[in-house]
Image (cartoon, coloured by chain):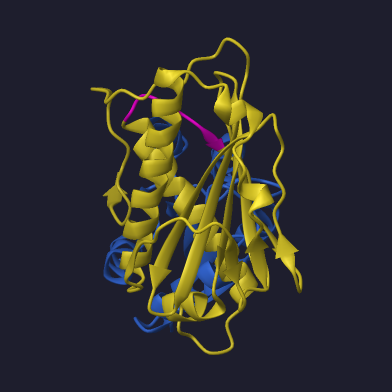
Chain colours: A blue, B yellow
Amino acid sequence: MKKKILVIDDSATIRQQVSLALSASGFDVLEAADGVEGLRMILSDAEIRAAICDVNMPHKNGLELVEELQATGLAPDLPIVMLTTEGQPELIQRAKAAGAKGWIVKPFKANLLVAAVKKMTA
Amino acid sequence: MFSISPAAKTRSAASAALDGHAADAVDRCGQLLREAAQELFSHYEVGVHSANEPEQVLIRNADFVGVLGFSSDEGIRGTLTLAMDQKVLERSYPLEGSDYSDWLGELTNQLLGRFKNSLLRHGTTIYLSLPVVIGGNALSLATRQATIYRDAVLASDQGQIFMRMALSIAPGVVLTLQPTSDQPPLSEGKAMIF
């Protein structure tokens, strides 16, 4: 059975790129267009094994999403990797403190993304 | 079609009022933006080079413009406007049936993100808003006298790329760009696993 990965990004083309990269490596990819939808999908689908999450999004940004999951104690074992244009050390530390498992700066290299997801879902 | 008329490229009052150091800093921002664009398009295998800034910019095959705002804690606000020939868009993301207006927004986002990282290496932090893409048949930019502009045109085999950085700097604020020894940002394409 394929492992389910959720990609959360307000850009349809980024979701498409991530989906293509992960699907080619045998993952089943779900998509959400913002943090609210992403959170809803995480909490309603226990089969999601990991999430790739943008930072700057409407409604709820990626850092708010991981912080909310940490604060509520929901989905404590779900690894989340941030995928964003941001490289600012303070934001990376904030994500790490909130329980995120990694940070990738766009444009991403497909092999790095796939390697990160494979490691987190092993 | 996207265009900038000669009248719209006239030096704004705010640009003319900049003193030597401030003008140098703004020029440096323009240079960093051009470098960021060359790196970004190179990643997507679109070879680009700086073109001489023409009196009038006219990109016939451009139906969208990407716009992204930014601000800083020190009273600097601005926008990045990005327009390009449709063939440049398609070359940078050659997947048939793709949503190219969305891709233009994402390119605008990645370009300003790269510019932000360059500014971080020079001790300046900006905060990005969310990209907006405007579509139309005959898009043209105007200028405001109270805004500082730096335009750049890049040329590629697929067509032109136009970038405009528009800045407002609060009275009394001095924009300085000095390489910093602070912890550098994580570079584009890099991954950090915690």
Does the stretch in magenta take in B124?
yes
Q: Considering depth in this image, is A70 or A106 the residue closer to the camera?
A: A106
Residue occupying image coordinates x 72% and y 49% = B142
Q: Considering depth in this image, is B25 or A83 the residue closer to the camera?
A: B25
Q: Name which quarter of the figure residue B58 lies in.
A: bottom right
Q: Main secondary structure of the magenta part?
A: loop
Residue occupying image coordinates x 55% and y 35% = B127
Does the stretch in magenta take in B152?
no
Q: Considering depth in this image, is A78 or B122 the residue closer to the camera?
A: B122
Residue occupying image coordinates x 65% and y 33% = B147
Task: Assign the N terminus of chain A to one quadrant of the image.
Answer: bottom left
Q: Count of labels shown? A: 0
Task: From the top left corner, tell me how far across and down residue A97 is, in percent.
Answer: 42, 33
Answer above or below: position of B102 versus B70.
Answer: below
Image: magenta residue range: B122-127
Judge from the rendering whether residue B114 lies leftward or rightward of residue A11; answer left or right.
left
Answer above or below: position of A101 versus A44.
Answer: above
Task: From the top left corner, tell me how far across and down residue B128 is, in percent.
Answer: 56, 40
Answer above or below: position of B133 versus B180.
Answer: below
Answer above or below: position of A111 versus A74.
Answer: below
